[in-house]
Amino acid sequence: MRNFNINNVKFNRYESFGKDFFQVEIYGYYYEQTLDKILKVGKILYTLENGVMTLDVIRVNIDYQNLGVGSKLLGFMFEDCKKANVRKVEGEFAPDDELQGRVFYTKHGFEIREEIMADRLYKTLKFEDESEQ
């Protein structure tokens, strides 16, 4: 893993459409030379329904956390939000993801509201030339 480079991760995108929804699942794969294997390093699943993007699942293999994989996966979702002119993203994470989840989501601009069974994520997106900021 010493030679890991986020630019060498290959992403496969799968889309599902329904009458009132659009769902995307993206997997990240990395060829690990030391093992001579292709490894799944991350996954994101999100759904657009009724003008709201819901972050259903985001997971990164523990060996590849804090290397940009999760940020890259969120970036795909934010791009789809921008294309669909969606300004609201919601999601939730389990309380057992407390520390790591809070750090990751707040780093990416989510507001976290505590609820009984899980913490809810809310983010209002702004797309005015974010790449130039």
Image (cartoon, rainbow, N blue to C red):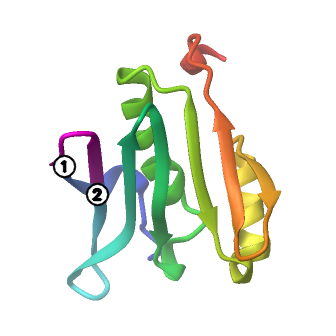
Element under label 2? strand
Give the residue at mark 2.
25
Answer with left or right where residue 124 lies relative to residue 15. Answer: right
Residue at the limit of the structure toward the bottom, as seen here: 35
Residue at image location 58% in from the left, 48% down from the top: 90
Contact between marks 1 and 2 (CB within 8 A): the answer is yes
x, y percent for residue 47: 37, 49
The disc at residue 15 is 1
Q: Amino acid at mark 1?
A: Glu
Q: Which quarter of the figure has residue 129? A: top right
Placement of 121 over or under 42, stated as above or below: above
Q: Which quarter of the figure has residue 113? A: bottom right
x, y percent for residue 23: 28, 49
Q: Which residues are magenta?
A: 15-24
Of 21 and 69, the residue lying toward us: 21
Q: Amino acid at mark 2?
A: Glu
Residue at image location 50% in from the left, 72% down from the top: 64
Placement of 75 over or under 86, stated as above or below: below
Residue at image location 62% in from the left, 62% down from the top: 92
Give the overall secondary structure of the magenta segment: strand
Q: Quadrant of the C terminus?
A: top right
**Residue 18 sits inside the magenta stretch:** yes
Answer with left or right where residue 36 lies relative to residue 51. Answer: left
Placement of 83 over or under 124, stated as above or below: above
x, y percent for residue 115: 78, 66
Answer with left or right where residue 40 lies relative to residue 18. Answer: right
Using a 10 Å C-alpha cutoff, classify the residue at mark 1 as few (fewer than 14 neighbours), some (14 to 19) or many (20 or more): few
